[in-house]
Amino acid sequence: MKELSTDVLVVGGGLGGIAAALAATEHGAQVVLTEGPRWLGGQLTAQATPPDEHPWVEMLGVTASYRSMRDGIRAYYRRHYPLTAQALRARQLNPGAGLVSRLCHEPRVAVSVLEAMLAPARSSGRLTVLRPYRAEAAAVDGDAVTAVTLVPDGDTADGPVTVHARYVIDATETGDLLPLAGAEYVTGAESRDETGEPSAKEHAEPLTMQAVSWCFAVDHVDGDHTIDRPATYDHWHSVRPAVWPGPLLAFSWPNPRTLEPSNGWLDPNPDDDPLAVEADQSKDAGTDDLWRFRRIAARRLFGPGAYASDITLVNWPMIDYMDGPLFEVSADEAAKHRNGARELALSALYWMQTEAPRPDGGTGFPSLRLRGDLLGSDDGLAQDVYVRESRRIRAVTTVKEDDVSLAIRGDHGATRYRDSVGIGMYRIDLHPSTGGDTYLDVASAPFQIPLGALLPQRLTNLLPAAKNIGTTHITNGAYRLHPVEWNIGEAAGTLAAHCVATGRTPHGVHATDAHLHDYQSLLSGRGVPLAWPEIRGY
């Protein structure tokens, strides 16, 4: 078996993992970064989900390196795409003119930008990227992880690798290292007795987790592009979730904020001005206009003939898979649910192509065409399922609903932490769950990320860098989105490198004011904001 030694091992190449690797290498550490057969970038690329961001993102509220990524995406379009003269001049170019974000774009562009950001560290030898690999086992000595064994994930001639590291960062989508390392963690919904949260359940339900979604991209061009009828189509066509106003395969669902029935519509290639689109979820969630909601290419921003159609990313209520979780169950059960999410997505597409109501009064959109070529897949769907919830460490500090809920905090703002390592903002946004729950979507105050939420209660050198920090089932709904995950990873990578350089421990940095100040100064020097100005949430 091949063996490697490094300062920092980052397992998982999503946004948190990339940010952790960048930060650690830039602070002088040697880093090994691992990922499976998917694109680097996680929810932004392999899961194909355009960034969900707060409305102030163009001015403040994200780290400098996250902003650099966003700037890089726009620069890539300006350099390589045939933008119209007006689009080329647009300072806040939104290539898809989607309603969910001020920067909706094709996932492949983000892959190119992220790879470019990592390139200097790889060329210098400070960063080694191992792909495709997944973690299979961890060696633990007392309260420290000493090594992680990685095995090939997919078709490769390479064999297992054991990586010895001083610090290990879990940036996987579902907190895969936590059980391997014997870390204390929680899954699903905690009880109200445990967290004291008004929206928590009366009893803990560890397998009640947010729905996952297998996203896909479509355009609308001449011809009949109807896919083969999925084998499970009759099943999904008959599903009527108890929390739904009717069939799952329909343009009707509970309004996430009011829970009243909401009726959406699909109008491919609308006659709109993409430069006039204002993406601001604090004013209008925009979820009912399905075509424009997550549009990733607006044809009118590009020269004649560049695009035959807009391209939109389908991450809509009808593909929320609620039948069971992807982890904390047997391998067979997990595989069944992964396949179920895929079958639901294909069934939703087939329903849209054959039965969905059209604005002209007819039914079916046979001209909808899968664009898996843009997502790097052979089957037309995203390379991986979009995961909204992970295992979460039992942390020194757990962020609870009372810390961020606007209804609770009011004009006092979110809880302020002496150990802030960054900031974020998103509503407490929980999708329907595997336990039969409907949406929970309530206002939040702009919040801080406490270092204590990145520190396991016991293990001394394992750090989370994704949706596996010390949040609850409730507050994960606010801390799970793109810029917050990036900030979490950047804070974890900076901390690991700082501890390598100084000989301090993460818990020691947290406990000692002078050491905490040194670390926070490093973050501030990187352009990581630690506090918000006075801004009211939504």
Image: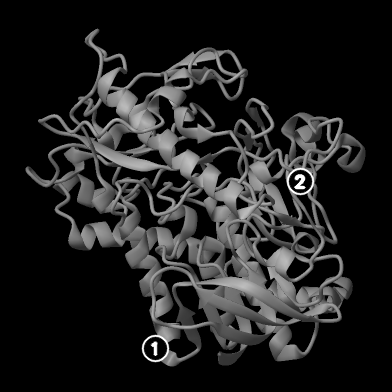
Residue under circle 1?
123
Which of the 4 image quadrants contains residue 12?
A: bottom right
In percent of width and height, residue 267 lies at: 27, 22
Which residue shows up at 69% across the image and 56% down it?
A: 531
In screen coordinates, is 522 left or right of 420?
left
Q: Residue at x 84, y 74 (%)?
A: 507
Residue 219 is labelled as none
Residue at image location 53% in from the left, 18% down from the top: 240
> Is 303 or 249 nearer to us in this picture?
249
Residue positioned 30% across, 17% down in the render:
355
Count of marks placed on residues: 2
Measured as percent of width and height from the top left, residue 102 is found at 40, 43
In this figure, which colouring scheme has been used for the structure? one colour
Name the residue beneath numbered marker 2: 472
**CA gap, disc 2 to disc 1?**
39 Å
Q: Nearer the viewer, mark 2 or mark 1?
A: 2
Mark 2, secondary structure of its residue: loop
